[in-house]
Amino acid sequence: MKLHKEGYSIVGYSLIIFVLVNAIVYYSVGKSLLFYFTLIVSAGLFAVILNFFRSPHRIFQGDDENVIVAPADGTIVVVEQVMENEYFQDKRLQVSIFMSLFNAHVNWIPVDGVVEQSFHQDGRFCAAYLPKSSVDNERSTVVIETVGGEKILVRQIAGAMARRIVTYTKPGVPCKINEQLGFIKFGSRVDLFLPLDAEIAVRMDETVKGNQTVIARLK
């Protein structure tokens, strides 16, 4: 399992803390029940942290023309027509993916094109599965213009535990499926805003896989 670069410092500090805690307990009480309990809990927590910061290597194998690919692992929590007021200021199809603590939190570019906009907005840290988190929470917005001239908006949203959103895209730079969009630390969601005539290929509560599952097809 490859560790994502965003997790290097957290994994390193966590390992040091767990080793120190277990060493203190061992030298205080020896090989007691408390020591083994502390050892098991520390190992479990460290395994969760390693799992969270994993960086799976994935290559999309399908035809990428006019295709929107899942930007993240998780569960579909929104598939509906909405008014997107922050950028497009018109109606769009919204598809939202909720990432639990146990999903890989790498985010991928969902469509081939050129980055038109990339900007960060401060906000709250409500539970990411709530509908209002799309406009209330801290978030990072990326708008990609496809070869065919369609504009796709991808929004990384912080959750109740997430305190840092990392976005790698820059305006004016070409981007492609299979490239990383960024990373969100500790529980969050990603929204997609698509043209109204896009053909949605997923349904509510469906589990999707980042850079693998087809979310929609553009006309």
Image: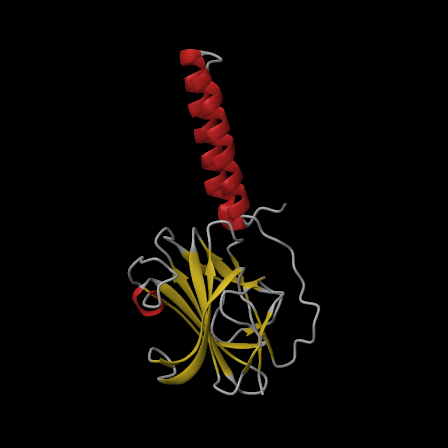
Left or right? Give the position of 204 relative to 123.
right
Q: How many numbered callouts?
A: 0
Whether 6 is drawn above or below 140: the answer is above
The answer to which of 203 and 84 lies nearer the viewer is 203
**What is the quadrant of the N terminus in the image?**
top right
Across and down, in percent, residue 102 comes to 50, 49
Whether 69 is drawn above or below 126: the answer is below
Would you identify the image quadrant in which residue 210 lies? bottom right
Whether 164 is drawn above or below 95: the answer is above
The answer to which of 109 and 133 lies nearer the viewer is 133
Left or right? Give the position of 3 relative to 130.
right
Across and down, in percent, residue 61 comes to 71, 68
Q: How is the image coloured?
A: secondary structure
Residue displayed at 54% across by 87% down: 149
Across and down, in percent, residue 138 comes to 33, 62
Whether 118 is drawn above or below 151: the answer is above
Across and down, in percent, residue 87 comes to 37, 79
Residue displayed at 58% across by 88% down: 219
Residue displayed at 61% across by 70% down: 177
